[in-house]
Each structure stands twice: as structure tokens, then as C-alpha cells.
């Protein structure tokens, strides 16, 4: 199984999981940044272009848009 997680707390995150001949893309994206479906589609295209393997497999996706109200930062040093 191969996992790819792209994280930027300012925009959300996308998680791409691949196992054999199938994959799943899921995550959360900030609705203030991804203001239209075209922006979400562009993000999906970038993820698919990262690896030729993902272009050859069926990759359904489930992405939710969220509105950020606050956040807590943790850097691993506490």
C-alpha cells in the first residue's frame, strides 16, 4: 500500500491512497481558497500528475470544502 499526504494548514489537505489497481483520494480544502469547482479540479489534476501510476487506475475521490474558524498549531516540540 502506498500513501501520499499533502499538507498545508492554510489550504487543507489531500490524501491519496493506492493499493494494487485502485486508489482513493480524500481530504478537506478551504472554501475561501478553492472558491469554484475549477480550482478543486486543478488540485486533482496536480495530484494525478505526481505519479503516472495514478493515471492508470480508477481513483474515486471524496473532498469536502470547509470554512476555517480557528486553528491550534503544534510543531512536535512540546
Image: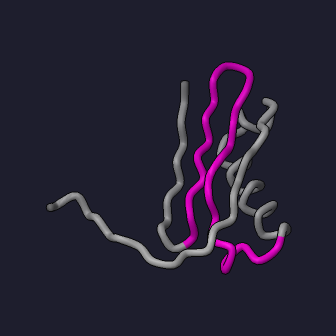
Q: Which quarter of the figure is the C terminus placed in?
A: bottom left
Report the number of discs: 0
13, above or below 66, in the image: above
Front one among 1 and 60: 60
- The residue at the point 62 percent across, 42 percent down is 16
- In the drawing, does residue 27 fall left or right of residue 76? right
- The residue at the point 79 percent across, 30 percent down is 57
Task: Choose top left, top right, bottom left or bottom right for residue 52.
Answer: top right
- The residue at the point 51 percent across, 78 percent down is 69
Task: Choose top left, top right, bottom left or bottom right for residue 31.
Answer: bottom right
- In the drawing, does residue 78 fall left or right of residue 53? left
- The magenta segment: 11-36
- In the drawing, does residue 5 fall left or right of residue 58? left
21, above or below 25, in the image: above
Task: Choose top left, top right, bottom left or bottom right for residue 60.
Answer: top right
30, above or below 58, in the image: below
For this orientation, the residue located farthest to the top is: 20
Amino acid at each position: 500500500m502506498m500513501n501520499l499526504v499533502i499538507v498545508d494548514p492554510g489550504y487543507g489537505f489531500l490524501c491519496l491512497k493506492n493499493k494494487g489497481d485502485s486508489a482513493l483520494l480524500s481530504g478537506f480544502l478551504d472554501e475561501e481558497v478553492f472558491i469554484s469547482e475549477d480550482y478543486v479540479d486543478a488540485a486533482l489534476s496536480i495530484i494525478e500528475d505526481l505519479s503516472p501510476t495514478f493515471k492508470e487506475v480508477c481513483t474515486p475521490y471524496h473532498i469536502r470544502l470547509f470554512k476555517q474558524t480557528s486553528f491550534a498549531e503544534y510543531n512536535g516540540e512540546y
